[in-house]
Amino acid sequence: MAEQAVQFPLTERKSKLSPIFIIGMLFFIFGFITWLNSVLIPYLKLACELNNVEAYLVTTAFYISYFVLAIPSARILNATGFKKGMSVGLAVMAVGALIFIPAALTRFYGLFLLGLFIQGSGLALLQTASNPYITILGPPESAAKRISIMGICNKVAGALAPIILGAIALKDADGLKARIATMAVEAKKLELDALASRVIIPYIVIMVVLLILAVIIYNSSLPEIDTDQEDETTAATNTGKTSVFQFPHLLLGVLTLFLYVGVEVIAGDTIINYANTQGIPLDTAKFFTSCTLACMLIGYGVGIVCIPKYLSQETAMKSSAGLGLILSALIIFTHGYVSVLGVALLGLANSLVWPAIWPMALAGLGRFTKIGSSLMIMGIAGGAIVPLGYGALADALNPTHAYVILIPSYLIILYYAFGGHKVGRPKAV
């Protein structure tokens, strides 16, 4: 193997659960902040009077930060190390949460988008550190299993987030929509201003929690991982490599991750609006993102039990992509609750792609692990672009047929699972 499990000193091995617990806590934060977007899209569409494309700029502002900040994140981590870098990321996210307060007070959509971009920037730093960290915290062949455990932390938080924020921000949303349709301009403005103010207290709480966690991580016993030294001792096949771009399997992994994040965000963040277009009231639909994430939790459970004992990472990814194609057809060719159920079940199809793709793409990188991880984080920008494409298709065609954008994405994921992850990979891996 070109990559080996990290070896901790004896005193650190005794507390090996501690790093996993800490990283699990960070993945919980990732999930909670990320899946708030599923409520913010219909909430801001109503509060700021937006069309579909404008509303899905929520995902664009949030996820484009991964593309912009991924390379700088690697440089920050090289300077600070993993632990201090994670603390910085949490502090940056707290600043993004703070910006929601003036955004709500002014009901200015641009400020909401700025806050989301800054939150995403902090998450880019956290993800650049935590994903390779958990990948090389143990044997490579069980990396998908460890990431599945992290995924459960992530998706439990993601399932809770829309329920909590939805109960506050989208309370009586259907009645409000009906009322403002007949209101005079001034009365409508007052009603929408009151709606916008609903997020102030939740985001103050989020800001405080993020700052507390930043202090906890900074003072934790989280050990550093020297990926540069690891390469010198275990990846002899990389001798002569001068650039991360000499690893085609990584570059294909970045493209695959780009498309995967796009379809995952579509599954979680469009389902509330889509259900509403299928005649399902917002007061009911606001819980549907949690259904998508519950399906992902089921998939992660399968990953923990079956990988690598019964399923290889490659087989898990093939199955996920194949199921995604079947469900895409179900969504497009049905309607009502059945079609919406297809969107929710995409959570099951998506669940094992992320855990499998990271170890497959980072295999054999050695001293290029940090910069390789940064490129993978840039791929998360798929969440900024692909859902925006869905929004444009929804306006141009209809919300059901717009899900055709899923099909080419799942086909490329399927290709990577079959052979793309082997292209140009060092022979010793």
Image (spheres, grey):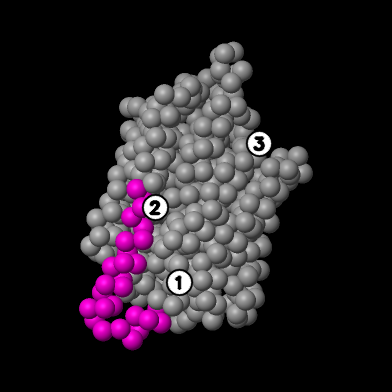
Magenta span: 177-204
- Vertical arrangement, residue 135 with respect to residue 124, above or below: above
Q: Residue furthest top?
A: 10
Q: Are marks 1 and 3 in contact (CB under 8 Å)?
A: no
Residue at image mark 3:
142
- Report whether residue 370 is seen: yes
Pick whichever of labels 1 and 2 is earlier in the sequence.
1
Q: What is the C-alpha distance between the residues marked 1 and 3?
A: 46 Å
Q: Quadrant of residue 185?
A: bottom left
- Vertical arrangement, residue 304 with respect to residue 188, above or below: above
Per the image, is 415 magenta? no
- In terms of secondary structure, where does tag 2 sit? helix
Please give the name of the residue rendered at 48% of the width and 39% of the height, measured from the top-left corner.
26
Please give the name of the residue rendered at 29% of the width and 48% of the height, measured from the top-left corner.
98
Tell me the amino acid under the disc marked 3. Ser
- 41 horizontally vs 72: left or right: right
Tell me the amino acid under the disc marked 1. Asp
- Report whether residue 421 is seen: no
Residue at image mark 1:
172
Q: Position of residue 229 (x, y in %)?
A: 47, 21
Q: Position of residue 259 (x, y in %)?
A: 49, 58
